[in-house]
Amino acid sequence: MKEKDTASNLVSAANSLDAVANVEPVRPAMETVLDTERQKDADILLLRNGDKLTGTVVNEKFSITTSYAHLDVVTKHIAGMNLEGGANNIESIIAENNNRFSGFIDDSFISFKLTNGPQLEIRREKVLKIVLRQRSQDMGEMKWTPFIWLKNGDYFHGQILTKDIILSTIYAKIPLDFATTESITLIGESNPLLTIVKMTNGDSVHGILEIEDIQIELDAGSVIEVYQDRIDRIFFKEGHVSAVATKNHFALVEKGSFTMGNTWGDGKSDEKPTHKVTLTYDFYIGKYEVTFNEYNAFCEATGRSKNSDDGWGGGIRPATYVEWFDAIEYCNWLSEMEGLLKAYDSEGNFLDKDGRVTTDPSKVVGYRLPTEAEWEYAARGGNKSRGYKYSGSDNADDVSWCRRNSGDEYLDENDIDKFIGNKCKIQKVGKKAPNELGLYDMSGNVEEWCSDFHSSYSCSPKTNPYNSTNSSNRVIRGGSYQSHASETTVASRSYCNPTHRGGFIGFRICKTL
């Protein structure tokens, strides 16, 4: 399949989840934003007390202070605004062309004219989300411009105004010609910052950028200067950015320590003993399990047969019947789509930025499956954890699709006869509440492959753990729609042969920051 066709498939898949950097020359309207369907004739205001108002946002523009710039975004260029985090957490603006800017929104009041009603001045602290009506005509004629993805998870299109950018290599100083540049990757762990430039002819050049700030004129308005250390990647050619569509589903998990294992005194023996785990690096992890739409794009691009959806309809349900080796090949494929080094060799070993086998997940550049420790830390809410037993709640039904609630009716999960007749099934991703990091379905729906081989716990503290010791099974986590609720806790563990294809096993992906 041609690369352009593959890119289109990826974008279509990601559009279903409202997280795509659109790569088509003419940008269609985003039909949903912030998990809410956009109307064509009204704006929506979702309040913290549960009220939903329809009408028109009267503010002409909104200001947001990000970690890299202060910018104003005209309201007609906004698709949605997320104020859910409140004063203590990051808020965000999603532009009509599906660009994301996060930080703190400065405006104190939302001026909102109710449909067939008065105009209200509502304090921003009372607002959860704002979903603006579809306005495809305002940005639909914009041509594709370079796409910039930042290390904090923000992403946007814009023209790079900075001229005469020089890449200093060990053998020469090379002026960058954007017309022949496919992408620029800035490796954040090195000092000075290592830059990898991939050219349209397939060449790759390593060096140091002889400039600190890059000036960008945003498609959504405003001219900003971004310090190069804040940039993860710049894509200059449409069709080479499409894999970012999946990445935009990611949540940032900041480094920290936690107690791994069952901390409630119940559970199975393999969830014990509890032990301290420290992760010394930040990483991204998928907000959702990889869906059939996304996995099918991979199958089409690589000539694979598509997996069964058991007649339930694939779409944005988690992809299943995926063996562990299929999952890591999906990860490697995404990495190659973006010009990143692969995370795995053919044996399933981690690879570092030099292509050498490593057992340190912090040294892996490409997309990969989370380690078991990363998975549990993220499921618990990372450094924002509130100590919930399930991922986001102490009540399984709030966050988990399990055997008692995933069928046609709520049932006693111990009643086997009803369980068989109730037709429990996999649900579309993101329908239950998220956890503290905005991650969905980490309890229940489908079990998820991790990178590690399965082994017993020990009580000794661990730093950046990853079990690379060869055994017959790989770890799976989270429980599934077939599981008892007690098997979908953040500490619950299971395992399976890596060549097994189960109708209850899927995966989500991650990437070291």
Image: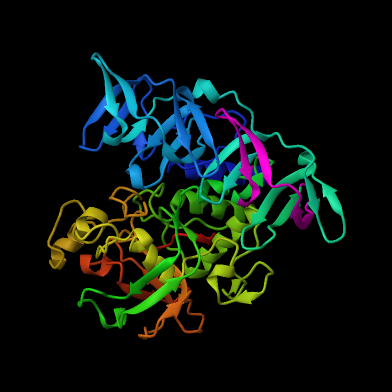
Quadrant into which the C terminus falls? bottom right
Left or right placement of residue 429 versus residue 370 in this view: left
- Give x and y (percent) for residue 443: 30, 61
**Residue 501 in view in this figure:** no
Q: Residue furthest right?
A: 172
- How is colour applied across the structure in the image? rainbow
- Give x and y (percent) for residue 195: 71, 55
- Give x and y (percent) for residue 215: 66, 37
- In the image, 304 versus 39, the foreground residue is 39
- In the image, 75 versus 143, the foreground residue is 75
Residue pictured at 24% horizontal, 15% vertical: 118
Dividing the picture into quadrants, the one containing residue 189 is bottom right
Q: On screen, 370 above or below 305? A: below
Left or right placement of residue 338 versus residue 321 in this view: right
Left or right placement of residue 78 versus residue 458 in this view: right
> Which range is magenta?
200-229
Magenta stretch holds residue 463 = no
Dividing the picture into quadrants, the one containing residue 480 is bottom left
Magenta stretch holds residue 227 = yes
**Residue 392 in view in this figure:** yes
Q: On screen, 79 above or below 68? A: above
Residue pictured at 54% horizontal, 25% vertical: 139
Residue pictured at 20% horizontal, 63% vertical: 420
Dividing the picture into quadrants, the one containing residue 255 is bottom left
- Give x and y (percent) for residue 426: 31, 55
Q: Total label count?
A: 0
